[in-house]
Amino acid sequence: MKIVTAVAPVNIAVIKYWGKRDEKLILPINDSLSATLSTDVMCAKTTILTSPDLKENKFWLNGKEQSFDNVRLKNCLTEIKKRCNSTLPYINWKIAICSENNFPTAAGLASSAAGYACLVYALAALYEIDGEISDIARLGSGSACRSVYGGWVRWQKGILSSGEDSIARPIASASHWPEMRVLVLVVNDNQKKYGSTIGMNHSVETSTLIRYRSESVIPQRIEEINKAILERNFHKFAEITMKDSNQFHAICLDTYPPCIYMNDVSHAIVNLVHHYNTYKEENKVAYTFDAGPNACIYLLESVLQEFLSIVNYIFPKPMDIKANDYFKGLPLDQTIIKKELMDDLNLTQNNEGVLKYLICTKVGEGPRLLTSSNEHLLQENGLPK
Amino acid sequence: MKIVTAVAPVNIAVIKYWGKRDEKLILPINDSLSATLSTDVMCAKTTILTSPDLKENKFWLNGKEQSFDNVRLKNCLTEIKKRCNSTLPYINWKIAICSENNFPTAAGLASSAAGYACLVYALAALYEIDGEISDIARLGSGSACRSVYGGWVRWQKGILSSGEDSIARPIASASHWPEMRVLVLVVNDNQKKYGSTIGMNHSVETSTLIRYRSESVIPQRIEEINKAILERNFHKFAEITMKDSNQFHAICLDTYPPCIYMNDVSHAIVNLVHHYNTYKEENKVAYTFDAGPNACIYLLESVLQEFLSIVNYIFPKPMDIKANDYFKGLPLDQTIIKKELMDDLNLTQNNEGVLKYLICTKVGEGPRLLTSSNEHLLQENGLPK
């Protein structure tokens, strides 16, 4: 019997991945770039066990058994086995996989990226593979390849049809910009979801602007944000981050039928951020939105409390939700309200309960193994604990 | 003393004008195309009086006196006087202008287009000008040049720096497609307005996609919709109309900071239209949105009642608003509800009062003079009646 357990992080792109040139290999039409977030706050955790006693392959996700007959899972597993030493005694044993996220999937925070990064990282440990695995994680979920590394990570689209060169590379470590914080504003929403896989395929098929974006806008933009990150130039970093989030959603709107992820609350947050930056006469805060209405706010620690006080004022916490259930992640002072600042910003207050909750986190390290046996999610018989 | 009174129509673009290459002459970066709507339902009305007894130029709009010191008004007047016979005995007399819209400006229905078309048409009559005046109306408000003609009208962007070739041309008459109807869904909204002049200037300055749209998307798209209109191919007409509305709003979103005109209700209408078209297995309805949240729906008379019944079901009329204040324009049967159709569409009902009211209208003729003296908005002394 062999067992490994790993945790892997979520990542939040500042240059967005949207559109594939190869559906099976998940090869993108443009480079993308993200920060990996601390696993202390949000992570996927996966235990994989292999044993001669297992009768069949099994897979549990967030407490529910899933079919193993999942093409993306199989693609990852096949690729891992291709690369491992074929004389490993346990290579043909069945496996049990148990995976969970420590954050609600309702947060819409690319749980599949953390999940597949974690799966592939654990598989690589199980089958003793060294070297590049971001291209294997990519086969599970495109953006998972970026969660294989900590810090600031660029996914190079690559040009080969094999996909070998479509890999992630760290451009700066987690400690490079230590003051960087991320505030996730989870928006209450009951819209039906336009899945991101379907959405990006429709965009490639129908948007008349997407090729121009991938070929003529992103190449320059990604070099500029790379430079801004290396120079820790927040003003420039924020401008490019916001522009790229908006352009990604512009492409979604240019899709036929359009795929709409942001809602009125998302746009109220956009408006708040621009008002605040104008008030500060410099970009102090940057928003970015993925395929959902939740805002990810990049900001430096020095403005975190002030910006949070505005968010709390404009989007009041419902009285009936406990502070601990509303302010998640790194500790925050939730009470500060600067009355004059609110008057200067002159923004409309929203009703209570417009935001579901907030998560405060920071840039962090890549996946790692947990060696203590009480960390495993599976018992020795291959069933979940 | 000389007095003239004219009415002029609103127009609704299906290929949108967004972005200028010359701010003063109001020269656009792309062609646009619209239908002129019947003046029986919505129109601007303008009376102009000139008399040797007037001491100064005066201007009233919707019952309020305005400053005559308005650069766009002056540009129109200067150009009119350049083109008229300079020996006209009254050419140097002062003038009084009184203008009103018969529809609420709150409808966000490009009242300036109808207003400037009416002003220029009335001025041309007053100063006895024959020939092209769409380029003069353009100096007042870009899209006003399209309201100078009835039916289906294309505004050619032109290439000359003088602007002489940036004129409107009818491509089909009002009677060409007699079944065409337009349903305006006026959305309740309290957002602060991002003015369209500022919006389009910001787009030209900051959007990295707008040039590609104007240079590489529109030229082909406008030929296709021209053809679809001439062939009365509603399916194709609808597809292009919806795609172009979405692309215009995509460009707005790609602007920095983004200018957001559509809200959650607008997107719910978009969703409803796509559901209905999917259900009918053909495009039967097309939406288009200008610089505001209101939907303009193009559809043929044959589906008007059925589509209206869905709108009434999904967006219920508030009980406390009288039907006559809610269903404006051409007469409609407001009561039909097909229960099975609603079940098949499986859409979420909204609260009452999400829509402010509806206007039903059709494609109509261009501006015309009203000769009966009781139509004039001004008394013989140059003051409003």
Image (spheres, coloured by chain):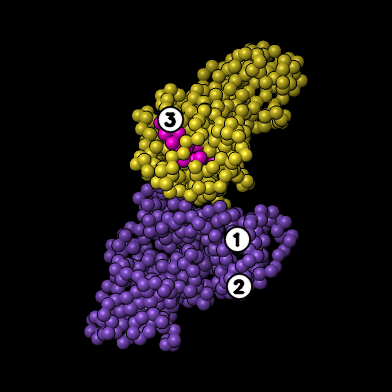
Chain colours: A purple, B yellow
Residue at the spot 28% in from the left edge and 65% down from the top edge: A162
Q: Residue at x 42, y 25 (%)?
A: B178
Q: Are marks 1 and 3 on the same chain?
A: no
The residue tagged 3 is B301
- In the image, residue B237 sits, relative to residue A326, either above or below, namely above
Counting from the top left corner in percent of width and height, residue A266 is at 55, 56
Magenta region includes residue B307: yes
Disc 1 secondary structure class: loop
- Quote the CA–CA distance across marks 1 and 2: 15 Å
Q: Earlier in the sequence, mark 1 or mark 2?
A: 2
Q: Which residues are magenta?
A: B294-312
Tag 1 near tag 2, CB within 8 Å: no
- Between the C-alphas of marks 3 and 2, the distance is 57 Å
Residue A353 shows which numbered tag? 1
Q: Residue at x 56, y 52 (%)?
A: A264
Horizontal relation, residue B296 to residue A336: left or right: left
Is residue B200 among the parts visible in the rendering? no
